[in-house]
C-alpha cells in the first residue's frame, strides 16, 4: 500500500498553523538575538568603562609625576604633541575650586583676584564640584562628561616648602569622547544584528513551519498504519491497540464492556459469483454501517477477512442487542439498494468479566458467533 501523503491533501488549518508557528519561532529567535546583543553591549561597556577608568587614572599618575620637573602648561604641550586623548581637558585647581593653570588661562588669571573669584571650576561645574567634595576618590559622571580628580601636594612634587598647600588635578573627558566608544560598539552590534537576524528569522520560520507539517505527516502515517484501507475502520493492529487499553480500564474501574464478534454472511459466495469487487463493496458497506451505528467512544475494527470486532463501552446486554438490531436492518437495506438482495451478518456477544483480557473476550465472542451462525443455518 502506498503511504505517501500528497502535498495537496494537507488541510488548510494545518498549513495556517504551520505558518503561524513559523512566524512565532522566527520572532522568538530574533528577540533572543536582541537580548543576547543587549547583554553583550552592557558587558562590553562595563569592561570598556573599567578600562577607560584605569587608563585615565594611569595618565593622571603620569601627569603628577611629570609635574615634578615641568609646569602643567609644559606637560599639556608635550601631551598634545603625542596626540593621546586630545579631546580631554586638564585643569589644576586650588582647594577652593578655582583654576590655577590649564586650558582656561584667562580664568586662571582672573581667579587669583578676589574681586573675580566667582570665575572658577566650582562655578563652571557646580554639580561636579559638589559631588567631588562628597567623595573625592571616585570619578564624577555628569552631562558635561566624566571628571577624574587627584590631589597633589608640594611634598609629592618634591617642593621644599613650609606651606602645606594642596592642589587638585582634574581630567575632563567630554561626552563626545565617551560616545565614540559606545557609538563604535553599537554600530558593530547593529551590523551583526542586520546580518544575523534575517538568518535566525528564516531558521525559526522553517523550524516552526516544518515541525507542524511533520507532526501532521506522522499522525497521518500512524493513521494509515492502524486503518484498514478497504473499509476505513481500524485494522488488526489498530484494533488491538485500542481494545486492550479499553479492557484494562474497564477492569480497573469495574465498569461494563460488551464485545461483539460479527461475521459478514455470504462473502465467499459474493466473491465467487460476482467478483472480488462486489465482495469488497459488501465489506465496505458492513464497516460503514457498524461504524455509524455505534457511538464515537466505541471501537470498531476489522479483525481480518469477513470478521469485525465491536467494543461497546459502558453498555449492557439490552443496549448491545438494540445496537446490533439497528446495524442488521441498515445493512439489509444497503444490500437491497446495491444488489437487490439483503446483506446480513452473524454476531456473537460477550460481557467483560473480572480480570478479563481483549484476547480472551475475542475468543469467547467468536464461539458465541459460531453458535449463532449454526443456529441461523439450522433454522
Image (tube, grey):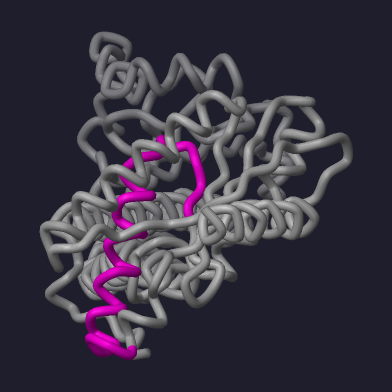
Is residue 180 in sight in this rendering? no
Q: Residue at x 80, y 55 (%)?
A: 360
Magenta residues: mostly which secondary structure?
A: helix
Query: Where 297 sits versus 122, above or below?
Result: below
Foreground residue among 348 and 246:
348
Q: Is residue 198 visible?
A: yes
Q: Which residues are magenta?
A: 272-300
Residue lying farthest to the front in this orientation = 379
The front one of 168 and 357 is: 357
Q: Position of residue 65 (x, y in %)?
A: 63, 58
> Residue 283: within the magenta?
yes
The residue at 16%/57% (across/down) is 336
Quadrant that contains the N terminus = bottom left
Comparing 7 with 336, the one in front is 336
Q: Residue at the spot x=49%, y=59% of the render?
A: 301
Q: In the figure, is residue 218 to the left or right of 155?
A: left
Residue 350, quarter of picture: top right
Q: Position of residue 238 (x, y in %)?
A: 55, 64
Seen at 34% across and 52% down, the residue is 28
* Direction from residue 24 to residue 374 in the image, left or right: right
- Pinpoint residue 311: horizontal percent, then vertical percent: 57, 44
Q: Is residue 151 left or right of residue 44?
A: right
Whole-percent x, y for residue 349 in the image: 63, 44
Name the side, left or right, on which 106 lies relative to 287.
left
Q: Examine the image and state in which quarter residue 87 appears.
A: bottom left
Q: Where 54 falls versus 139 (above or below)?
A: below
Residue extending furthest toward the right = 355
Amino acid at each position: 500500500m502506498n503511504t505517501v501523503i500528497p502535498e495537496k491533501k494537507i488541510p488548510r488549518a494545518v498549513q495556517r498553523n504551520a505558518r503561524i508557528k513559523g512566524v512565532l519561532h522566527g520572532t522568538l529567535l530574533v528577540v533572543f538575538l536582541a537580548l543576547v546583543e543587549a547583554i553583550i553591549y552592557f558587558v562590553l561597556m562595563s569592561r570598556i568603562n573599567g578600562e577607560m577608568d584605569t587608563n585615565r587614572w594611569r595618565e593622571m599618575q603620569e601627569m603628577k609625576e611629570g609635574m615634578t620637573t615641568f609646569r602643567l602648561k609644559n606637560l599639556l604641550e608635550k601631551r598634545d604633541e603625542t596626540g593621546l586623548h586630545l579631546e580631554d581637558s586638564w585643569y589644576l585647581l586650588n582647594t577652593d575650586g578655582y583654576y590655577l593653570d590649564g586650558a582656561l588661562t584667562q580664568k586662571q588669571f582672573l581667579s587669583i583676584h578676589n574681586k573675580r573669584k566667582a570665575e572658577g571650576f566650582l562655578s563652571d561645574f557646580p554639580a561636579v564640584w559638589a559631588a567631588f567634595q562628597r567623595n573625592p576618590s571616585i570619578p564624577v559622571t555628569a552631562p558635561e562628561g566624566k571628571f577624574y580628580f587627584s590631589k597633589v601636594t608640594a611634598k609629592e612634587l618634591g617642593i621644599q616648602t613650609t606651606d602645606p598647600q594642596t592642589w587638585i588635578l582634574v581630567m575632563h573627558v567630554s561626552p563626545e569622547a565617551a560616545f565614540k566608544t559606545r557609538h563604535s560598539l553599537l554600530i558593530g552590534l547593529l551590523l551583526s544584528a542586520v546580518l544575523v537576524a534575517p538568518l535566525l528569522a528564516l531558521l525559526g520560520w522553517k523550524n516552526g513551519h516544518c515541525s507542524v507539517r511533520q507532526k501532521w505527516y506522522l499522525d497521518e502515517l500512524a493513521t494509515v498504519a492502524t486503518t484498514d484501507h478497504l473499509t476505513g475502520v481500524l485494522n488488526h493492529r489498530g484494533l488491538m491497540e485500542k481494545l486492550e487499553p479499553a479492557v484494562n480500564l474497564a477492569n480497573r474501574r469495574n465498569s461494563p464492556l460488551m464485545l461483539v464478534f460479527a461475521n459478514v454472511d455470504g462473502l465467499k459466495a459474493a466473491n465467487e459469483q460476482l467478483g472480488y469487487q462486489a465482495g469488497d463493496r459488501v465489506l465496505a458497506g458492513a464497516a460503514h454501517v457498524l461504524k455509524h451505528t455505534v457511538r464515537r467512544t466505541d471501537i470498531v475494527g476489522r479483525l481480518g477477512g469477513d470478521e469485525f470486532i465491536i467494543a461497546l463501552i459502558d453498555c449492557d446486554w439490552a443496549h448491545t442487542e438494540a445496537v446490533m438490531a439497528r446495524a442488521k436492518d441498515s445493512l439489509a437495506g444497503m444490500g437491497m439498494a446495491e444488489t437487490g438482495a439483503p446483506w446480513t451478518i452473524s454476531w456473537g456477544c460477550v460481557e467483560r468479566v473480572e480480570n478479563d483480557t481483549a484476547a480472551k473476550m475475542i475468543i469467547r465472542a467468536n464461539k458465541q458467533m459460531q453458535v449463532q451462525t449454526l443456529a441461523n443455518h439450522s433454522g
